[in-house]
Amino acid sequence: MAEIEILRAIEKRLLWFACWMIHNANHIREKNEIKVGGHQASSASMVTIMTALYFAALRPEDRVAVKPHASPVFHALQYLMGNQTRENLENFRGYGGAQSYPSRTKDVDDVDFSTGSVGLGVAITAFASMIQDYIQAKPWGAPRNEGRMIALVGDAELDEGNIYECLQEGWKHGLRNTWWVIDYNRQSLDGMVREGLYNRITDIFLAFGWQVEVLKYGALQRAAFTRPGGAQLRDWIDTCPNAVYSALIFQGGAAWRKRLLSDLGDDPDARALIESYDDDALATLMENLGGHCMETLISTFQGIDHDRPVAIIAYTVKGWGTPLAGHKDNHAGLMTEVQMDGFKTRMGVRCGHEWDLFEGLTVDETDLRNFLSTVPFFAEGTRRRHAARVPAPALPAPTEASTSTQAAFGRLLDVLAKGDSDLAARIVTTSPDVTVSTNLGPWVNRRGLFARKDVPDTFRDERVPSTQKWRFSPSGQHLELGIAEMNLFLLLGAAGLSHSLFGERLIPIGTLYDPFVSRGLDALNYACYQDARFIVVGTPSGVSLASEGGAHQSIASPLIGMSQDGLAAFEPAFADELAVIMEWAFDYLQRDGEGDPDERTWLRDETGGSVYLRLSTRPVEQMRLPMSDDRTQGILDGAYWLREPGPNCEAVLIYQGTVATEAIAAAGHVGVDRRDLGVLAVTSADRLNAGWQSAQRQRAAGNSAAQSHIEALLSRVPREATLVTVIDGHPATLSWIGGVHGHPTISLGVEHFGQTGTVADLYHHFGIDRHGILSALDRLSIGRPISLGLY
C-alpha cells in the first residue's frame, strides 16, 4: 500500500481524536462548569503538518516543541503509538488527565519541551540546538547523531518579542539544526492577522541567515495552475484578503463558485477552469493549501539536506476538515451536538467506537500496524535520556577579612576553574553582557568562551593590556549573551534539560543584575515548569547599586524567589555561608528522587530543583564563626541562631542578606535595654516558608508531631517577645514569620523605588540601617528606652 495513503489514514484518525477529545472534555463538564476554549479549530489546522512530520520526517534524536493549541493532536498521535492512555484522553483537561498544553512534568507521553507560555516554546528550540553544539564539542560528550530542534509555531506567536531576541542571539552563535514550522492560518485568538505578514516574516528570517520555505499551494492547486486559466486563479489567490479567503472556506463550494465567477468569469479560460469542478471539488481545491498537502509537506521536509536553520511557512486553514473551518470566531468554538454527529458520520465512526484506534479507516489494519511499528521517530521507544550524577568537590570559604557575597561567588568559581574535577568540566556559565560586572571574569579567563570555531582574542594578539582573556574556542565553558534576560533564562532552561534531552549532564550557572530578574520572569517560570536544573545568580541586589538610581535597585526579587516553584532561593550574608550553599546546590541540581518530604524540615529536597542566589556587591566584615554541623545545617535549612535568645527574651532581630551588618550592630548596641535579645540569621526565607507551609499541611492531615525548622527555632522565644525583621528588599519577605507562633512583628525593608546616593544614604532613607532597627525596637518592643545617642 502506498505510504501516502497510510499517512492520510493516520491524518484522518488524528483529526477525529483531537476533535472528539475536546468535545468529550467539555461535554462531561458542561452541567457544572463554563465550557473552556475549544481549540478544535487550532488543532485541525496542524493535523496534516504533524502527521507528515512525526510519521515521515522525524528521527529519534530530533526534539519537538508542539504549539500549545495543537496538544490534542500530539496526545492523539502518542495514543496511536501506545504512549498515551485512553483514560487520560477521556479526562483531557481534567484532574490527572492529559494536559491542555504539552507538559514535560505533567503528561505521561513523550513531551520534549513544555509549551503554553506563548513564544517561549519556540525560542527554546534554538537554545537547545546551541546546547547540543556545546555538548558535541566536548571530549566527554558521547558521540551521537545530531538532532534537529523543531518548533511548531502559531503565526500569532510571532507577535512575541522573545522570538526576535532569540533570532538575533542565534545569528551571533551560528545557529544550526533548527526548524520552525509556522502554522500560517492567518487567524489569531481575536481575529485575522495583518495582510502580507508572511512577507515581513520572510524578510526577518532571511536577514538572520535562515532558509525560508513558503508552502502556499498544495499539489492540487499547483496542478490547476498549469491548466488554461490557472495563472488567473493563482493571481486571484495571491491577492485575496485573508478575511475573504477564510469566510469563503467557511461558506463552502457554492460560495467559492459565486465569488470566483464574479471576479474571474469574464476570462473564458478561468471560467472554464472553475466550471470543470463541482462544488465539493472546488472547495477541496481552494482548501488545498501547502500546509494541508501531504505530498508538499513530505517533499519539503525530506528535501532539507543541510544543517542551516529553516523557517517553513505553511499556509493552513484554521479548523480544516471541520464545520468550524475559516470562521473568525472559531478559536474558542466548539462543534454543536448536531455538527459533531455529522462530523462523526463523515469520519465513519460508529457510536461506542470513538476511541478505537482504527475506526472509520478503509486501509488494511495489518498494513497500518506494520507501518506504525517501523516509524523511525518512535522506533527507540520514549526518548528521555539519563545522565549520571557528578560529585561536587568541597568548596573552602574565601579567607578575606572583608568581602561581598558577589566577590566570594567569583572566587569560589575560580577555585573550581583552577581544578580538574568532573564537576568543573560540566559547568557552563552564561550572562547577558554582564559577565565581568557579576564576577564571572576569573572563571572565564581560566575556562574560556565557547564557540564552535576558534576566535582569537584580538586585544591579546595586539598586545593591548587587558584583565580579560576573551578567547573563543570549542573548549570554552562560557556562553556570552547579549542584553536580553529572556534569552538568559531560555538558555538556562535548555542547558538545564541537557541530561534528559541529550543524555549529558551540565551544571548551568547564569548571572544577571538582580533588578532585571523581572525582565526574564516569564522565561524563568517556563524553565522551572519544565523542571530544568540550573543556578541563577542575581547580583547586585537591593540598593547595592545606590549610585545608579531606583531602576537598578531590586525590591520584589526575594518574593519572586519565594513564590517560584522549582526554585530554591537563598540570600546569604557571608562568604562561608555561600560556600556551603553552593556546594549543596551542585548536588541539589542533580537530584531526581520522590516527592516525599524530609520529616526533619518537611522540605521536598530529594526531588531537586534549580537554585537562585541573591548576592550583593556590598563588602562586609566576615564573622569567622566555626562551621559546626548545626550551623551548616541551619544555613541549608534556611536559618540559624547567630545569638540564641535567653529565657527572658524581649525581642528578636531577624535579618536576611547583607543587612546583617546593621542587625548585628543594632544588637550589640542594645545591651541590657532588651534582655536576652536573640539574633536569627536567615539565609533562605523561601525554604523556611516552604517548610512551614508543608508542616501545616501535615498537621492538618493528622500528623500532629510535624514541625518545621522555623517553628522549632522560634519555639524557644516567649510569645510576648517582639520580632523585628529586616531585609534589603520587600519587607513581606520576612513579615510572615510573626504568624508562625503569633509573635508581634515589625518588618523593615524597601517598598518604594530608591534614588541615587550612597548605600548608607539609602539604608537610612528606608529605615533599614542600625538606627532604623534600633528605633523600631525602641518603639514597638517592651522594655526600657534604648539609648540612641550614638546613632
Image (cartoon, grey):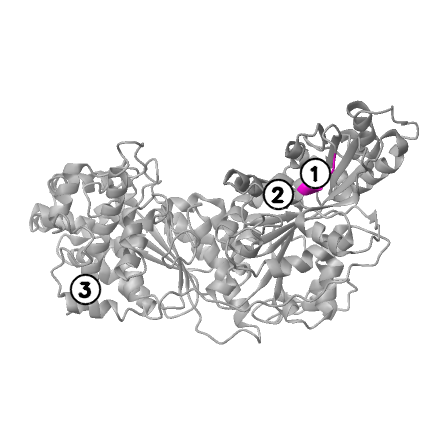
Q: Nearer the viewer, residue 439 or 98?
A: 98
> Residue 238 appears at what percent x and percent y?
26, 47
Circle 1 residues within 10 Å: few <14, some 14–19, many ≥20: few
Single out the mark in the foreground, 3 or 1.
Answer: 1
Circle 2 residues within 10 Å: few <14, some 14–19, many ≥20: many
Circle 3 residues within 10 Å: few <14, some 14–19, many ≥20: many
Name the residue beneath numbered marker 3: 6
Q: Disc 1 vs disc 2: Cβ atoms closer than 8 Å?
A: yes
Name the residue beneath numbered marker 1: 715
> Residue 604 appears at what percent x and percent y?
56, 51
> Residue 721 appears at what percent x and percent y?
75, 30
Q: Residue at x 81, y 37 (%)?
A: 646
Q: Label 3's element?
A: helix
Kindly identify the amino acid type of the residue bearing the numbered disc 3. Answer: Ile
Q: Residue at x 70, y 30 (%)?
A: 743
Residue 175 seen anywhere in this rendered image of the structure: no
> Can you say whether 253 is above or below 112 in the image?
above
Q: Residue at x 56, y 54 (%)?
A: 609
Q: Nearer the viewer, residue 449 or 783?
A: 783
Single out the mark in the foreground, 2 or 3.
Answer: 2
Find the distance from the CA under tag 1 to the CA under tag 2: 10 Å
Tell me if 612 is positioned left or right of 37 in this view.
right
> Can you say whether 11 is above or below 308 in the image?
above
Residue 308: name its quadrant: bottom left
Name the residue beneath numbered marker 2: 707
Looking at the rendering, the stretch of residues picked out in magenta corresponds to 712-717
Q: Label 2's element?
A: loop
